Amino acid sequence: MNMVESTVSVGAPAIRPIRARLTLTVLGFGALTIVTCLLAPLVGSTSISLARVFDRSIPFSDNVDAQIFFIARMPRVLAGAVTGAALAAAGVVFQAMLRNPLATPFTLGVSAGASLGAMSAIVLGAAVSFGPIAVVPLASLLGAAIAAAIVYRLATLRDRAMSTTVLLLAGVTLNSFFSALILFLQYIANFAQVYRAMRWVMGDLDVGSFQPILAALPLIVIAFVLFALLPSSLNLLSVGTDAATARGVDVARAQRLSFVSASLATAAAVSLAGPIGFVGIVVPHLVRLLVGVDHRVVLPASALFGAAFLVACDVGARTLLAPLEIPVGVITALLGGPFFLWLLVRRG
Amino acid sequence: MAAGSTRLTRRAVVVLIAIAAIVARGVDPRAAEAPKRIVSLVPALTEMLYAIGAGPQVVGVSSFDDFPPQVKSLPRVGALVDPDMERILSLRPDLVIVYGSQTTVETQLARAGIRAYNYRHAGLAGIFSTIRDLGRTVGRERESERLAQQIQQRLDSVQARVATQPKIRTLLVFERDLGSLRGLYASGGVGFMHDILLIAGGTNVFADVPREAVQPSVETILARAPSAILEVRPTGLPRERIPDERRVWDSLPSIPAVRDGRIRIVTDDYLVTPGPRVAQAAEAIARLIHPEAFK
């Protein structure tokens, strides 16, 4: 089924008009995402009774089943969907803009900046008092913003258009520079802090309430509004800046828009759930294999599929070894890595 | 002739045995002189040394040592991940107390001809065996035996005090992010903190997990429904933030501990130190979860 679809779409993109293909894809992937998100809260480390969950006669403060459903599982599923969509879409944008299939949302140092921020909050956080506000997500968002600002400044220093080479090199360098700072912080931290920081890096969707999601959501919404402006220019950018210019694309503007929107989505996702790997590279490639290379289709399909993928991975994370949890980043890597390799080989 | 050679052989054997005995005495660590200059990389064991009267022999401690107060003036030689070998050697120790995992340090010490005492962490029982073993090593057997008995007596009296109280299902938290329930580490069913909790009249909601630390999800915490939450967080939590941190639990109202307001957050360092103050820690925890038994 998938094979047929992908052959049709890759082989003869012009046969079916774009609007019909987009509708079909969005409906298909949308249905998958909705089904996943509806099924995911039904399973977990504990067995709960759905009848009790929705039993209004028991006050909420006494209804453990309802609390497990609404406080533990629903926010978790939602966090997974939001994070998965943001990371997968950011991956698509970075891959097109850098014209590099190996680019991920973390290539340009955003996640290293976020990790440094989170690590600083874990090690030094007690020194700054914010009342009952979670400092780690805030600090990681700040770290991500600083990293993105540095890379952006460097890449636009000489020219109005961004140099992908400078972007990549600056990103890689910033990644190792921040890693060095992280190592230093770990060195001066105590064991418990190092442990917690390591756990943060593995990614975690157990947000515990809707509030952290609401905090990240405005940034993600802005990012997706910007994403909506991108697809046609991404199609041309991914061919080359000269080709894009020749077709009347304002390359500098398109690049900046791509960089800002994808960085924003990544920063918000990482501050919400930690740097969960592989979503931003496996999902876009899978989607391209299924629906072809047109970004007008790939971008929304990747966002939807990324949401379903991460939610499904998190179901594994919280049930496989229950009552112990497997960090969700470990699951995405364990699933994503081999699957991606298999796809590469099969394709070749 | 034959008789003479036999006598000679017999004499030779006697002499050889005597020499062997002397040599053996020389290498027998128990018979060796008690160490005069001890460097300790393990704070809990530094405390033990002072508690059995070997304090005057301690010449260097780890960067985390702060008890008893006398250690504050001693040279610092790093800790688990960053032992400063140069400084250790410069203190000319004849015994260095290291963690079991510090094999590199041990090898280096062996090359320098310095004895190493290898410490491995193993629950409450491990504290007693370490005290006795350490006493033998530093020539303070009687003192260490007395200390072990004192601790045992105190633990017994704590246990007796709460014996008639109902066991409280407790969630014992070691760490979490400030202002949220994320990055939470709790005690599993292994380790001296778990053992102390049982003596203090509690049961551990994660007793079935055979690990020292568990990272439970919000769902698991809700499902385990602890009657008391005890957070022992010696690092990184200023006292003035405790009320705010306690309120973080309000997001899980069905937990009996939250409903009944049985959430205690303490920051004292000694509560998590597997050393001679373990009975004090047990008593403090008993007072927290059974305040009525101490009225």
Image (cartoon, coloured by chain):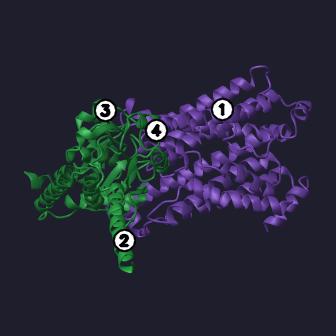
Chain colours: A purple, B green
Of mark 3 and mark 4, the one earlier in the sequence is 3
User: Residue tagged by mark 1?
Assistant: A174
Q: Are marks 2 and 4 in contact (CB under 8 Å)?
A: no
* Image mark 4: chain: B
Q: Residues within 10 Å of mark 3 (few under 14, many from 20)?
A: some
User: Closer to the camera: disc 2 or disc 4?
Assistant: 2
Rounded to the nearest angstrom, the CA distance separating label 3 from label 2 is 58 Å
Rounded to the nearest angstrom, the CA distance separating label 1 from label 3 is 41 Å
User: Residue tagged by mark 2?
Assistant: B8
Q: Secondary structure at mark 1?
A: helix
Residue B209: quarter of image: bottom left
- Residue occupying the far top of the picture: A158
- What amino acid does circle 3 point to? Leu
Give a yes or no on whether discs 1 and 2 share a subunit.
no
Rounded to the nearest angstrom, the CA distance separating label 2 from label 4 is 52 Å
- What amino acid does circle 1 point to? Leu
Q: Could you say which disc has been placed on residue B231 in the image? A: none
Rounded to the nearest angstrom, the CA distance separating label 4 from label 1 is 33 Å
Q: Is residue B291 left or right of residue A345?
A: left
Give a yes or no on whether discs 4 and 1 share a subunit.
no
Please indicate, yes or no, whether residue B194 appears anywhere in the rendered image: no
Q: Are marks 4 and 1 in contact (CB under 8 Å)?
A: no
Q: Residues within 10 Å of mark 4 (few under 14, many from 20)?
A: few
User: Residue tagged by mark 4?
Assistant: B85
Q: Is residue A21 left or right of residue B261?
A: right
